[in-house]
Image: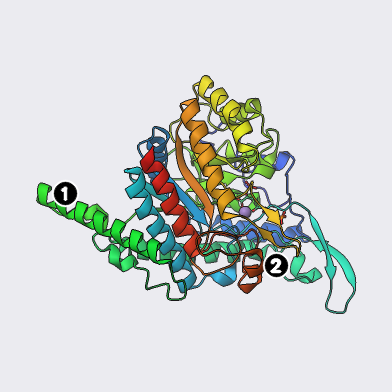
Amino acid sequence: MTGSKRDTTAPKPSTAPRGWHPDSWREFPVAQGITYPDPAKLAAAVETLRNMPPLVTSWEIERLKKHLADAQEGRRFILQGGDCAETLADTRPRVISAKLKILMQMSLVLVHGSMKPVVRIGRIAGQYAKPRSQPTERGKLADGREVELPNYFGDLVNRAEFTPEARAADPQLLLAGYQHAALTLNFVRSLTEGGFADLHHPEQWDLAFFENAVLPGTLREEYQRTSRQLSEALRFMEALGEKTIDDLTRVEFYTSHEGLNLEYESAQTRTVPRRDQWYDLTTHLPWIGERTRQLDGAHVEFFRGIANPVGVKISASAKPDEVLRLIETLSPDDEPGKIVLITRMGVRRAADALPGLLSAIKASGRRVLWICDPMHGNTQTTSSGRKTRDFGDILREIEITMDAHAAAGTVMGGVHFELTGEDVTECVGGAAGITEGDLEMNYATACDPRLNYRQALEMAFSIARKLRNR
Ligand SMILES: O=C[C@H](O)[C@H](O)COP(=O)(O)O
Ligand SMILES: C=C(OP(=O)(O)O)C(=O)O
Ligand SMILES: [Mn+2]
């Protein structure tokens, strides 16, 4: 990645780590780096982005950090979820509200199961940049010629269509991504501020909304019972306190995405009045992906300087020592709520990989929030070349992860899913019994397979049952 440099002669706040500034990452190797064919156009787009208002505020970020600190201690539970790759074309009211709705419904079920406040964090309003296993892809052009083109790296970078023009990295997409994130966030904020999320009226989150996604009867009844019980509990609490619990008429909702494209992240990284730290203001919780968490790489360099809480994806091949050094680099002061380790081991490796990792981090005394992503270690490719994931594998990884935390004396403080509010057929299994043969019915993801509405809700019930039984 190249691009314009900001004026680093301006006085830097004293709290920036030694040698760090929002562009210091440019001096380091950039894993999954993007080559922009026209550096001048990139510089112009980055400059425009630098002058745009932030998408989130430092107040919200600090508030989330407090919640994450609570979750580290087992006082809150985190639900993080959304698309693998959001697309600009899906900045549509129905798609956004369906996603919000499934996250609300899952959180309601999880509140009931965990008996804890649930913090909702969407993979939303910026999840537009994707790391890929292969930098290029071979395929046929419309005229039949077979060629190799850059892979699709998400709508923040290039376009999915298989043509040389579409696959060239386009700096204008940085601005389009920012704008679509702003539009999404505006709608999300309105919905979560108003009646849509009013816990006094969970019937508004009802299932009729999803007319095409008929739930199995037992799930529907279980959901209705849960929401009724919560309403009654709420009324009871209000009767005791003789006042309304106003906070419950709105819900807090936070955003997150993988901070892959550092041009985008660093352009929106700034200090704010009355605080002397640097914030990445594209999102509340940016995370570093499994493919970009090299200790001596550009992503770790960038992330070590921002005050946001930082997620790090951890696969089964990560060595405990390497993870410990990541924590020390990203949170030298061991700040509560700062580090979120998102384990994505895979059902077959989780039982072997987790105990050593959990006990090593526990022994270090470092504060981290452990979240389980049971999606990314469980991707399989079908004989017809479709990526899929099995509902049973996903649930089983959560179980194994819960057991490993219980044995290590650590806290699994949340879960992380790729999901959608739509009736897609991308993951197999679940009560509705989606088979490999069904995948073609509505396989719509721009990258990885997501739980559909029914699978996501069923997953929430299964986790809630497990949390309750412990
Ligand atoms: O979301 C995760 C990665 O981007 C994804 O798994 C990589 O997918 P690929 O193997 O199709 O490139
Ligand atoms: C790329 C992703 O995950 P990971 O870095 O864990 O592979 C993702 O969350 O979409
Ligand atoms: Mn993914």
The residues bearing labels 1 and 2 have C-alpha atoms spaced at a distance of 51 Å
Residue sitting nearer the eye, 391 or 433: 433
Question: Residue 341's mark?
Answer: none
Q: Is residue 173 left or right of residue 457?
A: right
Tell me the tag on residue 237.
1
Is 448 placed left or right of 367 in the picture? Answer: right
- Which tag is nearer the camera, tag 1 or tag 2? 1
The residue closer to the viewer here, 189 or 467, is: 467
Q: Position of residue 437 (x, y in %)?
A: 66, 68
Q: Quadrant of ligand 1?
A: bottom right
x then y, percent, for residue 25: 67, 41
Q: Residue at x 65, y 37 (%)?
A: 316
For the point 60% across and 55% down, which residue is it? Answer: 390
Residue 254 seen anywhere in this rendered image of the structure: no
Q: Nearer the viewer, residue 433 or 190?
A: 433
Q: Which residue is mark 2?
A: 159
Name the image quarter holding residue 292: top right
Residue pushed farthest bottom? 143
Work out which quarter of the rendered image holds the C terminus and state it. top left
